[in-house]
Image (cartoon, coloured by chain):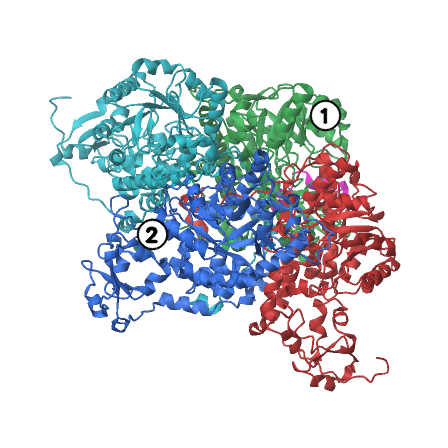
Chain colours: A red, B blue, C cyan, D green
Amino acid sequence: MAHRKLLTGKEVALHNSRESCWIIVHGNVYDVTDFLDEHPGGSKIILKYAGKDATKEYEPIHPPDAITTNLKPEKHLGPVDPGTVEKIEEVITAEERARQARIAARPHLSEILNLHDFEAIARTVLPEKAWAYYSSAADDEITIRENHSAFHRVWFRPRILRDVTKVDWSTTILGHKSSMPLYISATALGKLGHPDGELTLTRAAAKHGVIQMIPTLASCSFDEMVDAAAPGQVQFLQLYVNKDRGVTKRIVQHAEKRGIKGLFITVDAPQLGRREKDMRQKFEAEDPSEVKQAGQGGVDRSQGAARAISSFIDPGLNWSDMSFFKSITNMPLILKGVQCWEDALEAYDMGLAGVVLSNHGGRQLEFARSGIEVLVEVVDKLKEKRGLNFPNEKFQLFVDGGVRRATDVIKAIALGATAVGLGRPFIYAFSSHGQEGVERALQILHDEFEMNMRLLGARNIKEIVPEMVDASNIHLHTVSVPNDNLYNNNYEHLQGARIREIGSKL
Amino acid sequence: MAHRKLLTGKEVALHNSRESCWIIVHGNVYDVTDFLDEHPGGSKIILKYAGKDATKEYEPIHPPDAITTNLKPEKHLGPVDPGTVEKIEEVITAEERARQARIAARPHLSEILNLHDFEAIARTVLPEKAWAYYSSAADDEITIRENHSAFHRVWFRPRILRDVTKVDWSTTILGHKSSMPLYISATALGKLGHPDGELTLTRAAAKHGVIQMIPTLASCSFDEMVDAAAPGQVQFLQLYVNKDRGVTKRIVQHAEKRGIKGLFITVDAPQLGRREKDMRQKFEAEDPSEVKQAGQGGVDRSQGAARAISSFIDPGLNWSDMSFFKSITNMPLILKGVQCWEDALEAYDMGLAGVVLSNHGGRQLEFARSGIEVLVEVVDKLKEKRGLNFPNEKFQLFVDGGVRRATDVIKAIALGATAVGLGRPFIYAFSSHGQEGVERALQILHDEFEMNMRLLGARNIKEIVPEMVDASNIHLHTVSVPNDNLYNNNYEHLQGARIREIGSKL
Amino acid sequence: MAHRKLLTGKEVALHNSRESCWIIVHGNVYDVTDFLDEHPGGSKIILKYAGKDATKEYEPIHPPDAITTNLKPEKHLGPVDPGTVEKIEEVITAEERARQARIAARPHLSEILNLHDFEAIARTVLPEKAWAYYSSAADDEITIRENHSAFHRVWFRPRILRDVTKVDWSTTILGHKSSMPLYISATALGKLGHPDGELTLTRAAAKHGVIQMIPTLASCSFDEMVDAAAPGQVQFLQLYVNKDRGVTKRIVQHAEKRGIKGLFITVDAPQLGRREKDMRQKFEAEDPSEVKQAGQGGVDRSQGAARAISSFIDPGLNWSDMSFFKSITNMPLILKGVQCWEDALEAYDMGLAGVVLSNHGGRQLEFARSGIEVLVEVVDKLKEKRGLNFPNEKFQLFVDGGVRRATDVIKAIALGATAVGLGRPFIYAFSSHGQEGVERALQILHDEFEMNMRLLGARNIKEIVPEMVDASNIHLHTVSVPNDNLYNNNYEHLQGARIREIGSKL
Amino acid sequence: MAHRKLLTGKEVALHNSRESCWIIVHGNVYDVTDFLDEHPGGSKIILKYAGKDATKEYEPIHPPDAITTNLKPEKHLGPVDPGTVEKIEEVITAEERARQARIAARPHLSEILNLHDFEAIARTVLPEKAWAYYSSAADDEITIRENHSAFHRVWFRPRILRDVTKVDWSTTILGHKSSMPLYISATALGKLGHPDGELTLTRAAAKHGVIQMIPTLASCSFDEMVDAAAPGQVQFLQLYVNKDRGVTKRIVQHAEKRGIKGLFITVDAPQLGRREKDMRQKFEAEDPSEVKQAGQGGVDRSQGAARAISSFIDPGLNWSDMSFFKSITNMPLILKGVQCWEDALEAYDMGLAGVVLSNHGGRQLEFARSGIEVLVEVVDKLKEKRGLNFPNEKFQLFVDGGVRRATDVIKAIALGATAVGLGRPFIYAFSSHGQEGVERALQILHDEFEMNMRLLGARNIKEIVPEMVDASNIHLHTVSVPNDNLYNNNYEHLQGARIREIGSKL
C-alpha cells in the first residue's frame, strides 16, 4: 500500500450509499460496502457516515484495531488527505445539551464519599448507551446483584484492645507489591465513559501503587496502556483467546516482552453473554423495519455491544490449551472465571499460579454463584484434597464481583483470597470524574482500609484471619414466599406520633 | 335430524326472551331456554344474543363441542339458512378501540428479547377477561409465583475449559426426538388470545421440532390440531377424564388412531380451582341483582371460566382406573400433576411411563409445592427405594410451572428431569404476536440454550449433571418477620452524591 | 329501689355539669359525677351527655353490665319516665355522611369471594374507632401479621388418584358435631361493627352448623346470645376470670345451666395488651389539655378500649385455680392462650380437656409465636413425653390466629389440631354485611374446604395426615439484612418490551 | 494570666480576618488564627465569628473543654469585658422559622405512646446537622438497622397461669439498685438536641431510679452532670482513653472521687467511624472551593462531627493497659464494645467486672454483629470454657444497640444479660420534649415492663429464663435473591372487593 496517492475527501464523499460505502477512521479510508450487513451495530449507523469521517463515532465503541481486524486487507483503501475532508458539523441534541449541563453540575470530588457516589453520577452523566453497556448483565440481572448482596451474608467478628496505631494493608500479588489487597480488573470499552479511556486507570494505579489488569477489549491499545505506565509500575494482562492461536501467541509474547507480570486467561466467556439492557439500545440506533429477525440468516445485529466486539473468542478453548500457554510464555498463568472447587483443583494440579473466582460481573451465566461464595467452597476443598492453606503464595485465589467497600475486600481476604478485583467501580469513577475520579476512589478505599483494619483489630493483612468473619450463611439463597397482597392491602400500617397540621404546612 | 327444513333467521328471532330463548352457533340453532339458569357464564350474556347469532361471542370461550355436550339432543334444533340471518352490527367500545390501538403499537418481534416480553405485551393487548382467565391462579396466587421463584433457589456450578464449540441440547422425550428438552404444555381456550388458537402452537412446534401436548379444553378441536401437524410431527394428548368412561375411551382411542404418541392424564384437578381474578370478571358480565347467592341452589354462576367448562371432569378418578387405560390404549401413560414422591413411586410401580411433577401452574391447590422442588424429593426417594437414576428412559420425570428462561429448564434437567413443560409463556407469545410470536419464543429459548450450555460447560444434555447445580436451598420457604413500620419510617435512607439542582431541571 | 317515683327528664337535665353529672342509659339514671375522672374513656365524652340520654353512645362500646358493675349501687338512681326525656337531635357529620354513602356503595354479597374481601369492606365502612379497636394489636403489630404469615411457611404434599367424589370435612369438637373443623372464636364489643352485635354470629352459626364461642366482653349479654341459639345449637363460653371468684362462679354455673358445652378460660391476658392504634383514637375523644400524664396517679385514660373494659380481670389466676373450676362445673375445661409445650403438658397432666394454642390474635405479648408454630412443638413433645397422638379425643388441641382460608385450617388439622378458631374474619363479615355476611363467610369456607380436600386427596378429616404437609420451615424467623440503599438506588431496574407511545395515551 | 487587664469587645473586633482571627467563647478571648486550617469543622464557620462572640455557635457542638484543650495556652488571651461586646443580632432563616413552628406543633407528651414516637418528632424538630450527627452510622448503615432487627429473630415462649399480680422488674447493676434492667448509655453532644444537654438525662434518671452512664464527649461537663445528680444517685462513666495517659488518669481519679460507680472503657473505637450522613452535612457549612481533597495533607475537614471531636483517642490502647487502670482506680472496670466470645473470655480472665456487647450503635465497624447476637455466643462459650452461668454477679454482660421496646430488653435478660443500654432513644426523647421527654420515655418502658412481664409469666428478673425465648435464628443473616423485575412487573396484583365508585369520591 506504500506509494499510493493520498485519497481526497471529495473522492470518499462519492461513496455515500448502500451501493458503495466508504468511511474514514483515524485518517484511513475503508470500503465497508460488503460489511454493512455484517456490522454487529447495524448498517444504519454506518450509512450515516457514508462518505464521511466516522472517527468520532467509531472511537469510543470499538477496540482500536476492530476495523482493521474485521475488514479484509483489500478493503483498507489507505490514508486520506486530511485537509480535504470536510468537517462534520456536530448537531447537538437537546438530550445531549441536558447531559452536558448535568456534567457541569457534578458535585465536587470532595463531596464524593464512597464508590456508590461515582456510580450515581456516572448513571446521570454517561450517554445512555454507554451506561447500558457498562451496567448491563445477563438475563434478569439477578447474578450481578447477588454478587454484591453475597457480601452481606458475611459478618465480622472484630477483635479489640490491640495496638492499632499503625496499620498496614499493603500486600504482594503474584510476588509484586500492592498498596492494597485489590487490583483494577479488566473491563472493556473505556472510551465510552471518558475520552482517555483506560489510560485514566493506568495513571491512577501508578499514583496509588495498585496493579492494573489490562483488558483485551480496551478502547485504548495495549501499547498505549503500557507506555502510559510509570517506571516499575506493575500491570497484568487479561486475555480472550483467539480462535487463531497465532494471534494469541503474538499478543502474549508481545505482552511479556513489554513487561506484563501475569496473564489472566478468561475462561468464563466461551461466548459473550446476552445482556438485554445493552441489546435494547440497539433498536434505537436501527430502523426497526431493517432489523432482520434473529436466527433467520445474516448477522444478528440485535445482540448489543458485547457480542459485537467478541466474535473472535474461541469457544473451543480447553484444559489441553494450558500446555500451549506454558510453551509460549513464562508469565504466571491465572484462570479468570473459575466457579467451583473442581476446576480450581484442576488448575492447581496443572501447576497454574492461581485462579480468579468470578462470574464475570454477572454478565455471563445467570445464576452462577458469586466469587465470595465460591471462595468458601474452594478454600475448604483444596485444604481437604491437597492440604493447602490460604492465602497461599504458590496458588493464589482472587475474587471479583460486587465489591463497593473496603469491608467487602477484607471479608474476602479473611476467607483466604490474596486480593480482590474491582472493575465497574473504577469505570464509574472515570466516567464521573476522569483520572481524578479513579484517584479519589482509591483514596476512599485507602481511608476505609485504615479505619476498618483498626476497627477489626488487624494490623496487617496476615492478621485478617478466618475467625474474624462469620460466613456460615454464605450458601443461603432465600426467596421470600410471595406476598399475600389481599392480606397486606388490608393491613393498616401503624402511624406514629406526628406534628400537628400546621407544622407540615411550613 | 336429517330432512328437516332449514330454520330461518326470522323464526329464530322470535325466540328472543327469557321465556323462549334460541341462539345460533356455527350455523346451528339451539334452544337454550332451560339452560339459561345453568349457564356457568350467567344468563345475561346469553339473553344478549337471544334470537341471534352468538357464534362470535361463543367461539373463543368454549371448547368447540361445549354446546352440543351440555345441551340435550332435543334442544339441538338443526341448521339455519345462513342467508336469512341478520348480521349483527358490532359496536366497538372506546375501550376496545384503545385496545386495537395498542395492538397496532406493539413492538416489532425483533424487539422481543425474552419470554417476559410477550407476557408484558399480552397483558396490554388481551381483552380483560382473556387476561384474567390466562393469568389467574388459585386463592392468593402465592403458588403460581412460588413456581417461578423456586428456580431462584437453585444456583449453578458451571465448569470451564471444555471445548464448547459445538453444543447440542436436543433430546428424546418418550422416545421421540425433540430439538430442546422442553415441550409445549396443554393450556385451555386458546382463541381467547388469538383467532387461530392452539393451531399457532401446532405450527410453530413443527417449525422448531418440539412436541405439542394437545389440551382437552382447547378452543380448536382435537382433529383440527392433528390435521395441522406437519408430517411426522409428534403430539401428545392431555386428558381430563370424563365421568362417562365411554366418552373417555372414544377420545383416547381416536387419539391413538390419529397418531398421538403419549397420553398425559391430568390427576391434579378432580375439581377445577377457584381462580378469583377470573371469577371477578363474571360480575361485569352479569346484572348483580340477578346473581343468586352461592350455595343456595341453582348453578353457581360466579365461578369463572375454569369452572364453566369443566363440570364433566370425574372427581372419582383413582389408581384403579389405570388398568382401564392400559386396556384401551398402547400409548405410554403419564400422570400429569404428581406432587410427592409417594405418588411418583406408585406410578412407577404400576408400570406407567412417567409423571409430570406439577401443581397445574398454581391454578389448583394453593400452597402445593413447585414441580422443581418436588423433583428433588422424587429423584432422591426413587433412587433410595427402587435404585433408579434420572433422567431415566423407562420412567421419565417432567416438570412444569414458572419457567421463563432456558436456565430454568437446564436446572430441571440437571436435577433429573427428561424435559420441562411450558404453558403460559406460549399462550402469551401467540396472544402478543400469533404464530410468529410462538416461533420467536422458541428461537429465544434456542439462543438461550446455546449460550447457557456453553457457559455451563455442557456440550449435550447428558453432560448436564446434578453436580452442576446447588439445590440445597430448594426446600426453604421463608417469610420475613413483618416490617417494623414505626422503626422503618423513622429511618432516613442514605442519599448519595447528586447532581446540583440545575442538572435535574434539564 | 322499689316504689320510688319515676325520675323525669327535666330533673335529670339539671345535673349537666362536672359538679353534678347524671346520665340516662337504657332508661335508667346514673349519677356519674364521681366517676368522671375514673372513666377509662375520659370525662369529655360523658360530659357531652351530662343530663341527657347516653344510651346510643354507650351501647356499642360497653358490655351490657359495664355501668352497673362499675358504679356503686347508691349511684343507680332508678328508672326515668321515658316520655319526659328530650330526644337528642343527632348531628350527622360530613365524615359520617361519607361513611353512610360508602355503606350504600358496598359490593353485593355475591361479589365477595374470600374472607379478605370482608376485611377490605369493613375497613372502609366501619367508624374509625371501631376499626381501630378491632384491627389493633400489641406494640408494633408484628405478631398479628406473623400469625398469618406463619401459615405460609407450611406447604402441602397433596395425594392424587383417590376417589374424591364425596368429601366430608365435618368433625366433632369436644364431642359435638361441627360442619367444619373450625369454630367462631370469642371477640369483644360486637356492636361496634353492627347493631345486632354477636347475635349475627349466633344465628349464622346455627345456619351452618358451627359452634360459637361466646365472649365475656360481648356487646350483647350472655343470655341474649343463648336465647338466640337454635334448638340443639352448641355454644362454648370464653371466660375472663374475675378477681372476685364469686362473680366467676355465678357466671360459670349460669352458663352450664343454660347449656354451654365447654369453658375456654383465657390465660394469655392477666392484663390486656397495650394496643396503640386503639390508644391513638383516645386523643380525639379527649381534650388534650385534660389528659393527665400516664403514671402520675388517677386513672390513665389513654389506654384504649381494651383496657377500659377489662380492669376486673384477675392477674393472680394460676394453676391452683383449676381445682376451683373443677369444683364448680362439669363443663370441659380448656385453656385459651397456651404458648409452649410445657404448659400444654401441664394442662394435660391436670386432666383438662384441651388447650387453645393462641397468642390472642397478636393483641397481647408482642413476639409471642403463632399458634400454628406452637402446635408443631406441642404435638412433638406430648408424643415424646406422654405418648399422645393428635388429633386426640381426650386432649384436644385448638389453634387460632391469622386464619383466612380453608387451606390454613387444613394445615392445622394435618399437624394435629382438632379445630381452628376464627375471630376477626367473622367480625369483619358482620361489620361489612351483618348476619348475611357471616353466612357468606361460612359458605366461602365451605366451598374452599370442598375444593381443597379434593385437591389434597383427603376424603374426610382423618385422611388429613401429617405427611400431607411440609412444616420443616415453621420455626424459621428470618429478617433480611437491611437494604443497601445506595447500591439499590444505583441499580437500574430492567425494562421489558413496551407498547409504543400511542398505546399508553389511549 | 492573673492581673491582666480585661480585653474589650472593640479590641477583639479588630481581629476579624484570616490574617488575625480572635473569637470570644464563654467570656474568654482566643486567638485561633493558626488554628483555622486545623479546625475539623472548617475555617469558614470560625471566620463567620472572627472578632465576635462565638459562644452560641460553639456550645452545642463542642465538649466544654474543646477549645482549651486544642489551643496552646499562649493563645488563651483571657477574659473580655462583657459590657463591651456587641450583641450579635441573630438572623432567623425561613428554614429555622419553619422548624420553630414545628416545635410549637409537637404533639402533647401524653400522645407519645412509644419510643419510636420521640424519634419521629426529633427527626422533625432537630436542626438538620443535629439529626445527621445523632442518626448517622457507619458506611451503608446496615449494622445500625441490623441491631434493631436482630431482636426480631428472637421470639418468646411465654408461660401462663402464674400469679402475676405483683411483678417486679428492678435489678442490681454492678451491685447498685436499678428500677429497671436498663441504663442510659453514653452518647455525645447532647446540646445539639436540647440546651440542657445531658443534664436532662441526669435528672430524669434520678426520678426513675435508673443509672446514667456519663459520656466523655458530652456537651455538658463531667462535673455539671455529677453536680446535677440527686443524693445517692448512681452514675457510671464512659471513657475514651487519651493518648496522654496522664490526662486519662486525672479523669478517672477525679471521677472516682466524685462517686462514679463504674468505669466503662470504650474499646470499639480506636478511630471514630466514617459516618456519611454526618459527613455530607459538612459541605453545606463549607465553601466547596475551600475544601481540600482528603488525603492531601492538612486536616481533612470533611469527616463530620464525630471525627472532629475525637482526635485525642488512643488507637494504641491494648490489653496491657488494663493493669494501668487497675493501678489507678478501684472502680469496677467494664469493656464497652466487645464483639466476640474470645475477647469476653479474655476480659473475664483478666478479672474485669464485665463487658458491654456492642457495636457502638452501628457507628463503627459496618457488618459487626449486633450485641444481642454476640450475647448468645458469649454465654455459650463462657459456660463451655469457664463454667459460668449468666446473668452472673461476678462478671456481668451488658448489651446495647437497637433497643426500642421493653420486649427487646427482656429478650436480652432471658439470654443472660444483666442489663441493657439505651442511647439514641433517650437522645430523641430530650430532643423532642426535653427532660420531660426522657421521663415519659422511662415511664413508657415502665408500663411496657409491667405488662410484658405479666404476659410472659415472669414475676421478677430471675424468672426471665433462657427457656422463655427461642433464639435459634439469631445467627441467620439472610438476603433475598434479587427481585426478578420483569417477572414481577408482569404479575398483576390481586384486587379484592371494593366499594363502588361513589364511595371513594366522598
Query: Dividing the picture into quarters, in which one does residue C251 lie?
Result: top left
- Give the prevailing secondary structure in the magenta stretch: helix
> Please, which chain is the residue tagged with disc 1 on?
D
Query: Dividing the picture into quarters, in which one does residue A32 lie?
Result: bottom right
Q: Which residues are magenta?
A: D52-74
> Please, which chain is the residue tagged with disc 2 on?
B
In the displayed structure, would residue C210 be above or below residue C443?
A: above
How dense is the environment of label 1, judged by Cα within 10 Å: few (below 14), some, or many (20 and up)? few
Q: Is residue C490 magenta?
A: no
Can residue D197 be spotted in the picture?
Answer: no
**Residue at the disc numbered 2:** B308
Say what amino acid the circle numbered 1 marks: Glu
Can residue B52 be spotted in the picture?
Answer: yes
Q: Which mark is residue D346?
A: 1
Q: Which mark is residue D239?
A: none
Residue C72 located left or right of residue A328: left
* Mark 2 element type: helix
Residue under the point 83% across and 61% down: A251
